[in-house]
Image (spheres, rainbow, N blue to C red):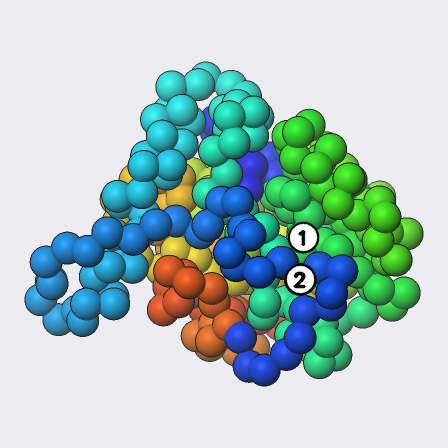
C-alpha cells in the first residue's frame, strides 16, 4: 500500500537465508508491525489461523484510522498518513522473500522499478552493480526517509528515488523488472486495469513483473483492499501477461503468513511484439 492519492495512486500501501547486516532489523525493533491480530469465532471451513489472519485487516486500530483518514481527505491522504505515522504497511525491513531472491540470483538484472516504494527497504535490498533500482513515491516524507536510509549504504549509487504519480509518470527508459508489494492493494479496485496498462507500458517486452500478493483475505473495504490471484489475472491477461509461477510466500512475516502469494509474470511472445 505504501502511497496513494484519492483516485490516482501515487506510489501508493522465508527458506534459510541471511539478510545483510546493513539491512537486518530484528522484528522486535520494527516500529510499525504488519497489522495486529485479534481472535474471533471460527468461520465455517476455516481454521483458527486463517480466521485470525482475516481479522488482521478488519480489526487493527491503526488500519481503521488509516482508512478513516483516506476516506476523509479529498487529496493528500497518503502524505497525511506519513505525517501522522500511520504506515501499517511498513514492516521496517525489506521483504525477506526479495532478499532471498536477490541473494540466490533469481532476480532479473538491469533496471528495476518499485512503485509505491515507501521508505525504500526493498529498493535498497535489490540494488547491486548489476541492477539499478528506481523507487517511485508520491509522498515527500517517504522520499526523504528513503534517501536517508540509502545514502550511507554501499549500494547507494545503484538506487534513486523519484516523487511521481505512477499513473501519470513517463519514464525515459523501460525496465527489466517491476516489483509490486502493497501497491496493488492500496489502489482503488477500479484503478487496477490502469495499473496493468502502466505495468505493460513500463516493462521491456521481455521484462518480468513480480507481484507479492497481499492481503489475500475476505475483508470488506480498504485500503488495503483484498486481493486474489484472479484479481491479478483479470487485469494482466488482457495485457498479454501470463504467470510463470504463483506460489505461497513461505517467507512472509508474522500475521502476513498464509495471506501472501508470490507471482512472477511475463508477456507472451505474441503480445510482446505488439
**Camera sees residue 252:** yes
The residue labelled by disc 1 is 121
The residue at 26%/45% (across/down) is: 58
On the rendered structure, is 196 left or right of 23?
A: left
The residue at 84%/45% (across/down) is: 151
Up-down relation of residue 250 to residue 194 (above or below)? below
The residue at 11%/63% (across/down) is: 42
The image quarter containing residue 207 is: bottom right
x and y, in percent, of residue 139 in the image:
64, 30
On the rendered structure, is 68 left or right of 20?
A: left
Up-down relation of residue 14 to residue 208 (above or below)? below
Q: Quadrant of the C terminus?
A: bottom right
The residue labelled by disc 2 is 24
The image quarter containing residue 254 is: bottom left
Q: CA distance from mark 2 to mark 1?
A: 10 Å
Up-down relation of residue 228 to residue 195 (above or below)? below
The residue at 36%/30% (across/down) is: 65
- Estimate how packed mark 2 is, as few (under 14), some (14 to 19) or many (20 or more) residues with alpha carbons within 10 Å: few
**Camera sees residue 207:** no
Mark 1 secondary-structure assignment:
helix
- Estimate how packed mark 1 is, as few (under 14), some (14 to 19) or many (20 or more) residues with alpha carbons within 10 Å: many
Callout 2 touching callout 1 (CB < 8 Å): no
Sequence-wise, which precedes: disc 2 or disc 1? 2
x and y, in percent, of residue 267 in the image:
63, 68
Mark 2 or 1: in front is 2
Q: Give the camera-side residue of 248 and 155.
A: 155
On the rendered structure, is 225 left or right of 173?
A: left
Mark 2 secondary-structure assignment:
loop
x and y, in percent, of residue 229 in the image:
40, 65
x and y, in percent, of residue 180 in the image:
58, 55
Amino acid at each position: 500500500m505504501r502511497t496513494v492519492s484519492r483516485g490516482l495512486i501515487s506510489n501508493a500501501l522465508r527458506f534459510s537465508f541471511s539478510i545483510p547486516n546493513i539491512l537486518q532489523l530484528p522484528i522486535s525493533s520494527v516500529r510499525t508491525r504488519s497489522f495486529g491480530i485479534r481472535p474471533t469465532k471460527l468461520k465455517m471451513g476455516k481454521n483458527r489461523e486463517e480466521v485470525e489472519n482475516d481479522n488482521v485487516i478488519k480489526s487493527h486500530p491503526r488500519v481503521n484510522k488509516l482508512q478513516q483518514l483516506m476516506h476523509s481527505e479529498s487529496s493528500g491522504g497518503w502524505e497525511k498518513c506519513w505525517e501522522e505515522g500511520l504506515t501499517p504497511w511498513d514492516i521496517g525491513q525489506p521483504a525477506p522473500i526479495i532478499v532471498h531472491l536477490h541473494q540466490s540470483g533469481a532476480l532479473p538484472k538491469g533496471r528495476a522499478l518499485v512503485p509505491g516504494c515507501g521508505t525504500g527497504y526493498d529498493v535498497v535490498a535489490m540494488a547491486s552493480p548489476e541492477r539499478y533500482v528506481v523507487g517511485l513515491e508520491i509522498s515527500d516524507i517517504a522520499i526523504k526517509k528513503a534517501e536517508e536510509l540509502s545514502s550511507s549504504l554501499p549500494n547507494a549509487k545503484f538506487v534513486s528515488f523519484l516523487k511521481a504519480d505512477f499513473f501519470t509518470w513517463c519514464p525515459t527508459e523501460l525496465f527489466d523488472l517491476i516489483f509490486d508489494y502493497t501497491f496493488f492493494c492500496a489502489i482503488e479496485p477500479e484503478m487496477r486495469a490502469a495499473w496493468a496498462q502502466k505495468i505493460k507500458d513500463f516493462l521491456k517486452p521481455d521484462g518480468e513483473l513480480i507481484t507479492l500478493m497481499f492481503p489475500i483475505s475476505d475483508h470488506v473495504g480498504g485500503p488495503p483492499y483484498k486481493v486474489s490471484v484472479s484479481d491479478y489475472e483479470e487485469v494482466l491477461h488482457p495485457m498479454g501477461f501470463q504467470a510463470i509461477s504463483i506460489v505461497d510466500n513461505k517467507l512472509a512475516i508474522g500475521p502476513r503468513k498464509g495471506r501472501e502469494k508470490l507471482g512472477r509474470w511475463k508477456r507472451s511472445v505474441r503480445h510482446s511484439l505488439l
